[in-house]
Image (cartoon, coloured by chain):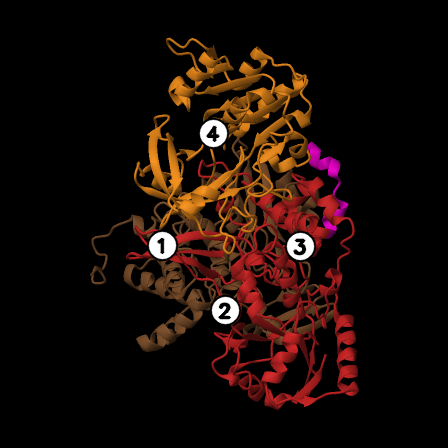
Chain colours: A brown, B red, C orange
Amino acid sequence: MVDESKLREKAAEVLAREDVRRLIGWKRGTYGFEAAPCVIKDASEAEALIFDPTCVQNPASFITLEEKKPVPRGQEADTRKIAVMVKGCDSRAIVQQLVEKAYDRDHVIVLGIPCLGVIDRRKAAALFGDVASQVSAKVDAEKVAVDVGGDVKTVDRKDILMDKCLRCRYPNPLVYDELLADEVEKWAGDEFADVGEFEGQSPEEKWAFWEEQFSKCIRCYSCRNVCPMCYCVECVVTKLQPQWTRRATDISENTVYHIQRAWHLAGRCIECMECQRVCPVDIPIMTLNRKLTRDVKEMFEYEPGVDVEAQPLLASYNPQDPEDFIM
Amino acid sequence: MGDYKFAKTKLAEVIGAMSDYQVVAPVESGEVVRFAVVDDPAKVTLEFSNTNVPPKELMFPETETLFRFRLGGTDLEPEVPDAAARRAVFGIRPCDAMAYTIVEKLYNWDFPDPYFNNRREATTLVGYACAEPCANCFCPSLGGGPGSEKGLDSIAFDLGDTMYLKTLTDKGEELVKALGGVLESAGEAEARAAAKQVEEAEGKIRRSIDTEGIAEHLPELYGHPFWEQFSDRCLSCGICTFLCPTCHCFDIQDESEGLDARRARMWDTCMFSEYSLHASGHNPRPTRKERTCNRVSHKYSFFPTNFDAIACVGCGRCINYCPVNIDLLDILEKSKQADAKEAQDA
Amino acid sequence: MMDDTNPYLPYTAKILEAWFETPGDRCIKTFKVSFEDEKVRDTWSHRPGQCAMVGRLGTGESMFCISSSPTEEGYLRFSIMRAGKNTAALHELEAGDTMTVRGPLGNSFPVEEWEGKNIITIGGGIGQAPLRPVINYIRANKDSYGDLTVLYGARTSEDHCFKGEFEEFFSEGTTCHLSVDVEEEKWPHFVGFVPTLLMEVSPSPDNAIAVTCGPPVMINFVVQNLEKLGFAPEQIYTTLEERMKCGIGKCGRCNIGNLYVCKDGPVFSYATLKKIPEAFA
C-alpha cells in the first residue's frame, strides 16, 4: 500500500516545480464509496490527495479532456507539464496515448502507484446498501477492509473489487517517472472466460441481449467522454457534416453508436473499464470491448498499452497478419 | 377527495383493471427499472428507490417526432399527441411529479408547447410516496418531500401488506372509478399510518441546502475560479442533465429514410461543447468551466428569475450518477463562500 | 402570426429573387421571398430587428434576422452567410425554389421610442443585415426622426453587403460612411476598422441613438468607443446571435444569463447587456 503522506509530499514537490502546471490524482468524494478525480494547481492543495481502493477513476482520461481557450494575441500558450498519478491499468492508457502520439512523453510526469484492486460501486451497493457517510478502504491480496464511518468490515476480494482487478495482469504501472510504493506481485491471469461464455450463445440469444441493453442507452456519451482512448477533437457520432449517426435515440442508432465505438477501440482499448463503470443505465459495454481485445490478441498477438515503443495495431502491417476475416 | 386501499398482493390485478387507460409503470428491463408501457401487469415492480432515467421522458420523450413530410414536398403532417387519450402513470415518485409542475412553466411561456401540454393533459399521475429516501435525496429543501402531492392526481403509500391510495384531483378520482370494484375504502387508520411513514421518511433525509440568496449570488460568479475545482474533472457528458427530471433542453434534427422524412426533437445537454457552438466556429461556452457554471446557474438562478421556481427537485440523480463525484450540493455550498469580487478579477 | 396551435410548424415561402452579395467561402446570399399561403401573406407583419427560423425541409432551420423593413411590402428578405450545414443547403436554392419560414420571432428595435432622435447605425460585415430594416424604416418615416447616419465596413469592398443601396443613400443625402479594413486600389472611402471609423466620424451623443451589429470583437470595441464619445448605455443598442434550435425559448441553448436571445432578444440595449457578464462571451 502506498503511504498517503509520502504521496502528498511527492505531489507537493512536483507541483512546486516551475515547469509543472497541474497534477491529477484523487481525493475523497462527498459521500459513500465515491472518490473524486482531483486536479490541483498549487502545492498547498496536495493535502487533499488520497489513494485507496475507492480511487477507481482513471486520471489519464483527464490529460486529453482539457479544453483550452484560444491564446489571446500577444500571449504565449502555457506549455508546462501535467503530472498524473496512475494505477497499473491507468498507466496503460498513458502508454497507448504515447504510442498514438497524443502528446510527447515529456509533456507528462507520471507518478506510478502499484495497486491491489479498486472497489466496484455496484458490488459495494449490493453489500452495504445506499451509504451516505464517506467510506475508506484497505486492500491486500486476500481481503478488502471497508471502513464505513468507523465501522470496519472485511470483505472477500471477489465480492467487492471490480472484475478487471480480479483478472489484473498489470497491477504495477508500465510507464512512470517515479513509483510511489513498492511493486506488488501479479496475482492473476486473464483467460477471457467471460468472452468465451458470451460467445457460446446463439446469434439470436446474443442479439436479444444486446437489443435489450442498447435500447436502454440514453446517449449521454459518458462512456465516450470518460474513455482515455476517446480523445478525438471531433467525434464521428457528433459530426454534422456529413452526419454518420443520427441523434435520435432508438435501437438502430444506439447500436450503430456502440458498435462504432467498439470498433474504434479495437487494438486500442486498455481495459480500464471506465466506460462500463460510468454508464448510468448499466450497459455491459466491456463485453464488446473484451471480445475485440481477445480477437486482437489471438489474431495479431497484439496487446495495446503495454509497450511505449510499439506501433499502433491499425497503423502497422505485417505480411503474416491473418486475412481470413476480410470479406 | 377519496381514500382507498388494496392488498399489495393484488397489485397486478389493480394495474390490470386500468384497462380504459394506457398504463405506464416502473418495469425492470436489462437490470434497471424504468417507466414503460405495461403489457403485462405482473411485470410492474415497486421494488425501486427511484428509476435511473426519470419519468420526464413520459412528457418529453428522448426522441419525439414534431412532424412528418416527404422530401421535396411542402405538406407537413404534425404528430401532436392526443390530449383526450387516457394514460395512467402508476408509481411516479413525488419529486419526479413535482418536476412537471416546474418545467410546464417553460413549456407555456409565450408559445404553449402542444406536445408537452397534450401529453400532460392526457395523463393521470398516481404517485408513490417514498419510505426509504436515498443517500443523496434533498427534496424537502426544494419544497417537496417523500409524500409531496405536487403535480399528482393521487398518491399511493406502501404500508407493508396494504397499499393506501389517496386521490387528490378529479382526474385521480376518475381513474379510481374506472377501476370498478377492485379497491376497498380506507379510513383514518391508513391515513395516520401514511402520515407517520412520511414523517419518518423525512427524518431519514440526510442532505439539504439552504437556497436563500443563491439566485442573486450565482450570476455574480460568472468566470470565478471556484468553478474550476468542479469543472476541471467534469467529463462534459450528459449524465447530470439527461437524468435530471427538470432539465428540458433539446436539439431539433431532420431525418429521412428514402423520401420519408421527419423533423424530430431529442434530449440535448448544455454540458456538450457542440450544444452552444456557432456554425462560425465561435463558442460562447468554450470550456467545461463555462458549461458547469451555466448548468448550475440555470437551475438555481436563471430559471427562478424567469419563473419563480428553482429548476431542481432534490432527487439526487445528478449526484448519484456523476462518474467523477461532481456534487451539486457541494457546488452550491462552495458558491456561497465564493466572493463575487474575485470573479471580476478573474 | 406563428401557427397558433403549433409553434414548431413553419410556413412555405417561394423565392422571388436570389443573388450573391459577397464572394468567397463564407459568401452571403440574399433571398427575397413571399409566402405561398395567401392568408399568411396577408396577415404577416413584423417589426425591424425581428427574426425568423429559415430552413429547408430535410436539412433543418436556423435563425436569421429579417433584413427587410416592414415598410418594404410584398416580400421578406434574408441575407444569409454560408457557414454550416443549414446555410450551405439554403445557398443551393434559386428563384422559384421554396424554403420554410417560421416567425416572426424575438423582440425588435424600439423605433417608436426613438422618434425625434438622431439615429446612427454602425455595421460590420453581415452585421449590416439586422441594421438594414432599421435604416429603411427610418428612411420611410423620415419626418419622425432627426438625422440618420450610416457607418458600415467590411474586410474589403467586395465583402460589403447591399452595395448598390449605399449609392442610393449618397444620392438621397443620407449621411453614409463606408470603410474597408485593408488598403485597396480605387477605394474612395475610409480605410481602417469600423471602431476607428466611428472615432473618425465622431457622432454627437446629444439626442442620439447608436445601433450596432457585427462580429463580437467589433461590437465590443464599438461599444467602448461609443462610451468614449459620451453615449450612455441606454443610448446604445445591438443585436446578438447564439446557436438556436426552437426559436421560442424552450430548447435552451441561446441563453445569456436568464435571458433567451431568441425570445428576449435579439435586440438588447447596452444598459441590459452590461449587467450580464457572459453577454459578450
Query: What span is in magenta?
Result: B333-346
Residue ID for mark 1: B75
Circle number at residue A4: 3
Q: What residue type is labelled 4?
A: Ala
Prevailing secondary structure of the magenta residues:
helix
Category of crowding for the residue at label 2, using alpha-carbon neighbours closer than 10 angstroms: few (below 14), some (14–19), many (at least 20): some
Residue ID for mark 2: A163
Residue A43 can be seen in this image: no
Residue ID for mark 4: C129
Q: For the residues labelled 2 and 1, say whether their Cβ atoms are less than 8 Å apart.
A: no
Q: Which amino acid does label 3 sit on?
A: Glu
Helix, strand or loop at disc 3? helix
Q: Which residue is drawn at 70% across and 33% down?
A: B344
Q: Respond whether the residues carrying marks 3 and 4 are from the same subunit.
A: no
What is the distance, in whole Å, between disc 2 and disc 3 at their CAs?
Answer: 25 Å
Q: Which chain hosts label 2?
A: A
Q: For the residues labelled 2 and 3, say whether their Cβ atoms are less than 8 Å apart.
A: no
What is the distance, in whole Å, between disc 1 and disc 3 at their CAs?
Answer: 68 Å
What is the distance, in whole Å, between disc 2 and disc 1 at their CAs?
Answer: 55 Å
Report whether B77 appears left or right of B44: left
